[in-house]
Amino acid sequence: MGLNTQSLSKLFCYAALVIGVLLVFLLPAQKVIWYDESISVLCSKGISYGSSAQFSGRDTILSGQVAELNNFSDVYTATVRDNANSFLYNIGLHWFTDLFGNTLTVYTVFSKLLALCTLLAFFVLSRRLMGYHLFTGVAILMLVANGVFFGMSHEVRAYMMGMLFSLLTGLAVFRTLREGPRPGKVLIASLCAVAAILCHFLSVYIIITLFIFLLIVGKRKLFSVTNIFAMVAPALILAVYFYKALEGLKIMQGQNNRIATKVAGTASEFSLGKVVTESLRLMSLDFSIELVSFASQYLLVIVASFAIVVVLFGWAFKVTKDSAVRLNLLFLFCTGISGGLFLAALCMRSGHMTAIYGRYHSFGVPFATLFSVYALYVISQNVMGRGRYMHMLLSMLVIIPSVFYFARVANALPASDRYNQNKVADAIAGNHADRVVVPHIRHAFLIQCFLPQETNVAYIIDSTATQFTLYTPSGVQKMNILADPE
């Protein structure tokens, strides 16, 4: 007996999920880290800007002494001293590397596992909206191909964990809207929201959008004593954390002030037009309209790319008369566009462009990408005749550039190593070095983060050193210093 259309669609959905998982885990083939990732690595091991003071005046430090910082309390302290952001990610990375080792692969796999969980949550939400339709499988592949999702899936940063909990919050809110605001569902949504903010503070824009949507649609049914308690109680967790981490919030404010001072000299380059143009470009990418990736220097291409999003919304909203479907379109569109609007507003308030940053859009990407595919699905279910040809053309404009963009990005060679302390750690462990000369204790800290837990080595601090010098049983080995980890 042959497979019917429904069975084939279901098979395609699961095949797309398997392909998505494989792409996330197998790509990219090579990995290097950059400055912000090195900070995440250090914080996850309880090492902060202030850790150097604990070892001041010493010219030799033992790895065991540095390893003593690798505990929950010091991870919290390091997070606060950085700027109090990403605590949940830092402590998760701390526990994960304690269990599975300190290699760069392990640090990266943690993000890949978070990406897998995000992909599964995305599949659940897609299936609730479209069932086992071909467009559900397309949505999965589109998310994997999205530049922000793919980039964050292997970056040692908190964005993917924040994306996961933002999506879980959205899924919980969606269920609450569908099934009624019961206290249990509201509590789950609130806890996921708190987790998202503790992963990354900027996820607040997606959380605010979701809860405004819940308040507007839920109306009076939401305002029972138990539901209010279910929303307020988790918020107390945030209140306690912010109170305890007040020092870190002040540090963040200081960092922002320094950025503002640094870019003050380039204020003439800031303009409303640039904010709008860059926001439209990034929002187009959020919605997986990758056409803009191939000609982002042209204003016409940027406007046309975002116009595709507007057309998708207008056409889908017009052709369906189902109020539930229209609500779904509004839900996905509002959450998808929230990051661009929020960050553009921050940019205008600060008077410089640093708030408009692709990674900061991470938390709305799953919603935006799902909107694009869901809108195509809604249109396909409601148009006839010539409308189908227009739908086919629109689908090609959305899907085909994503395929080519992902092929280009996935095959791209990684940037050159900026930091090689992880390779120094590999050389120490592989060659059984018992001493290593470093020019500053910061290098010792980052090397320590990549050493196997049982490795014992003495770090000799020599400010005149121009190379790492490893003392091994077979002799001296020297390695170049690519960059200062701070």
Image (spheres, helix red, strand yellow):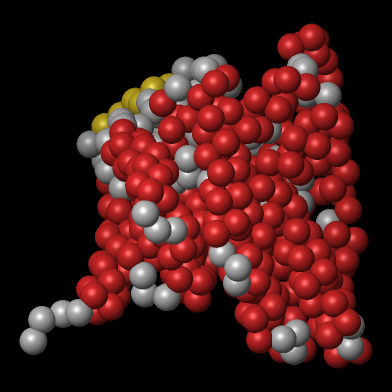
Q: Is residue 263 above or below residue 293?
A: above
The image quadrant that residue 318 belongs to is bottom right
Q: Is residue 6 above or below residue 260?
A: below
Q: Is residue 160 left or right of residue 417?
A: right
User: Residue 101 versus residue 372: which sits nearer the camera?
Assistant: 372
The C terminus sits in image quarter: top right
Q: Is residue 269 above or below residue 32?
A: above
Q: Position of residue 339 (x, y in %)?
A: 69, 46
Residue at the location (66% across, 48% down)?
Answer: 337
Q: Position of residue 368 (x, y in %)?
A: 56, 52
Residue at the location (24% across, 75% down)?
Answer: 5
Q: Position of residue 76 (x, y in %)?
A: 72, 59
The N terminus sits in image quarter: bottom left
Residue 168, can we see it?
no
Q: Is residue 211 left or right of residue 102?
A: right
Residue occupying the far left of the picture: 1
Residue at the location (73% across, 64% down)?
Answer: 210
Residue 135, can we see it?
yes
User: Residue 50 versus residue 170: which sits nearer the camera?
Assistant: 170
User: Residue 138 versus residue 152: which sits nearer the camera?
Assistant: 138
Total marks placed: 0
The image quadrant that residue 485 belongs to is top right
Q: Position of residue 263 (x, y in %)?
A: 77, 17
Residue at the location (38% across, 48% down)?
Answer: 386
